[in-house]
Amino acid sequence: MSKTRKISILGSTGSIGIQTLDVIEKLGDMFKINYLTINTRIDLLEPQILKFNPKGVVITDEKKYKEFKSTTSFKGKILSGEEGVIEAACDDTNDLLLTALVGFAGVIPTYHALQKGIDIALANKETLVSAGSIITKLANEKNAKILAVDSEHSAILQCLIGEDHNDIEKIILTASGGPCRTTLKSEFAKITVESALKHPNWSMGNKITIDSATMMNKGLEVIEAFWLFGLRIDQIETIIHPQSIIHSMVQFNDGSIKAQMGLPDMRVPISYALTYPKHSKFDFPRMDFEKFSTLTFEKTDLDKFECLQLAYIALKIGGTAPAIINAANEIAVQEFLNKNISFDKISYFISKALNTLEIIENPSLDELIDIDKLTRIFTLNEIKK
Amino acid sequence: MSKTRKISILGSTGSIGIQTLDVIEKLGDMFKINYLTINTRIDLLEPQILKFNPKGVVITDEKKYKEFKSTTSFKGKILSGEEGVIEAACDDTNDLLLTALVGFAGVIPTYHALQKGIDIALANKETLVSAGSIITKLANEKNAKILAVDSEHSAILQCLIGEDHNDIEKIILTASGGPCRTTLKSEFAKITVESALKHPNWSMGNKITIDSATMMNKGLEVIEAFWLFGLRIDQIETIIHPQSIIHSMVQFNDGSIKAQMGLPDMRVPISYALTYPKHSKFDFPRMDFEKFSTLTFEKTDLDKFECLQLAYIALKIGGTAPAIINAANEIAVQEFLNKNISFDKISYFISKALNTLEIIENPSLDELIDIDKLTRIFTLNEIKK
């Protein structure tokens, strides 16, 4: 861990990207930035370039790419488009790729990086949700690590360090319950975009915050955990824990439970993925048990949070089913954010896609890309009907 | 772990001994019993002999030894006295020694067993409290393991599996607060033996239950943790957690906390010590988060629980100071159980011994035995004044 490691960050101006750079800065010279990739926020990219002096940057948005190129004084490589992101991901000198892209877009660059045996710090859960079988198989073949950068899977990873996989009885993913935990299901139709974006504990991007409100977030995490930890579906449970202090738990064969806890601060799972398996010294605010003197738990209501139930169903169906619910969810959430559908219709349109579209049992990556596109078109059409 | 391991159990008819045999029975042929040692309860020993067919037994009480010998049909070795216990502890065929003796009596046989390189499952906390320096040094020299058989240190051990010792920021020992948690300090003088023996969560022996009421139990555990985990004193904290579900926690350098949880069931830490580092399959009752839906925490009040404060002070003083408070505590608790002193006077007499008796900086085992005896005489004299 003493030699400087080279890292590229896909999505450096998003919430996770920004916090990752904060962690990297605190780690001193442990990391050197290869590539930073962004979509549109060139205003945020400029100060990142000044501070971290990357080898290159990628701006996927064509217009912003041109604007950036004509104004910047940056002397490194400037790439654009998805091809640019793939080039950044696969750069031969990458020791680690942190991928914080949103949605299915994260799958392809990760796939290509894994083919080169590059370790992945994965903040894009759709990669495993949609292409879990292909991605984990490839990682095993190439002996590359996939380290989860979200609080729940990082918690599980931390709890499993030094443990025998065969000793696991089950894992328990905690869920805050999101902004709609106490809202009755009968009120779901009336939930506004503004209220659904008010997450009680975590500061995250819009898509993931809505996923938290529908609990699809937890559903995607269940699927992700299935692939990350090689468990049976019945070994993956969820529980509502409104304080978001316990980030997840593992129960072993003797009934002993290990939990990972702390203040809700994404920099902890980020730093753990970056310096795994070390807990490097950081001055992040510490948990204060006098302040958080009460931790509570509630059963997860699968009847109320239909998106979570759909995720379990899709995982049981297997094949392209998780990719379908993931793609349908992305469209439905976007259309909810665009105020084209009501909150309760998110699960309705996902269910519609899952029930209508053909399931392929062992899809290739190309088939997954096709089903992703097809599901988006189908769902958008359904919404516009 | 597949070959049968030979174990001797010191204190087989006590609370821990009985539960250890329950665990061993559930483990099938993983263990073969070498020796069972008891003090007086020959009525409980007979069925243990029938079930586990040990190589030998030890009855330390001379009268009960004679009674047993003249009535039993047991064909194995029957030994008596402390020499008998030492012989059982040191038996060359022991793979593991579980020592569940109460008080300072546990130190000597453990010392002798360690000299033969036998691993120790340690349920006698006074061994490390009084002779931590000597015992841990010897264990290191002989490359023998000391595995704690109490819920707190087992929790820490489980949380530290696979972790780098240098990554530890601190450990947090949880305490139920015992039967006197909500009792005002001004009421301590009026606490009866009967009420002090009513522990809210754990079923344990009398001595340890009173130690829980005074929180000396936690004090002894702080000292034990100091030796077991090689930490600085300021890295060992305590917190009141009345539900006894979280058994202890470790906080790492990144602020991440790992906690070990479960129902209060001593068979979990016992089985962990027996099959370490495996979590073997057991049907112990599982934690139900709907039943224990609220976990709470309170600051430990060192002004109220003077015994806990005295333990920290003794640890800071070092040398024979912890042995002094341990011996004084044993006498004071016994005299409280005998209704010769009031509850609030337990800490008073411990403090008296600590402040009066000479401290030796690097005591030998013989000096520790002497100071133990001396402290007992001194404390008893003080009480009888």
Image (cartoon, coloured by chain):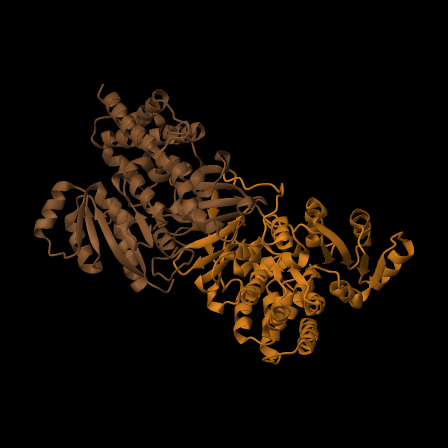
Chain colours: A brown, B orange
The percent position of residue A51, horizontal first and vertical second, equals 20, 60
Query: In the figure, A332 relative to A221: above or below?
Result: above
In the depicted view, which residue is nearer to us: B5 or B150? B5
> Disc count in the image?
0
Q: Residue at x 91, y 57 (%)?
A: B70
The percent position of residue B62, horizontal first and vertical second, equals 84, 64
Can you say which quadrant of the picture contains the C terminus of chain B?
Answer: bottom right
A93 vs B323, left or right, is: left
B365 vs B69, left or right, is: left
Q: Is residue A191 visible?
A: no
Query: In the figure, A229 relative to B60: above or below?
Result: above
Residue A252 lies in quadrant: top right
Q: Residue at x 40, y 45 (%)?
A: A139
The percent position of residue B172, horizontal first and vertical second, equals 48, 59
The percent position of residue B80, horizontal first and vertical second, equals 83, 64
Q: Residue at x 59, y 74 (%)?
A: B321
A61 vs B295, left or right, is: left
Residue most toward the left?
A: A70
Residue most toward the top?
A: A385
Residue B40 lies in quadrant: bottom right
In the depicted view, which residue is nearer to us: A9 or A223? A9
In the depicted view, which residue is nearer to us: B302 or A21? A21
In the depicted view, which residue is nearer to us: B336 or B235? B235
Query: In the figure, A25 relative to B133: above or below?
Result: above
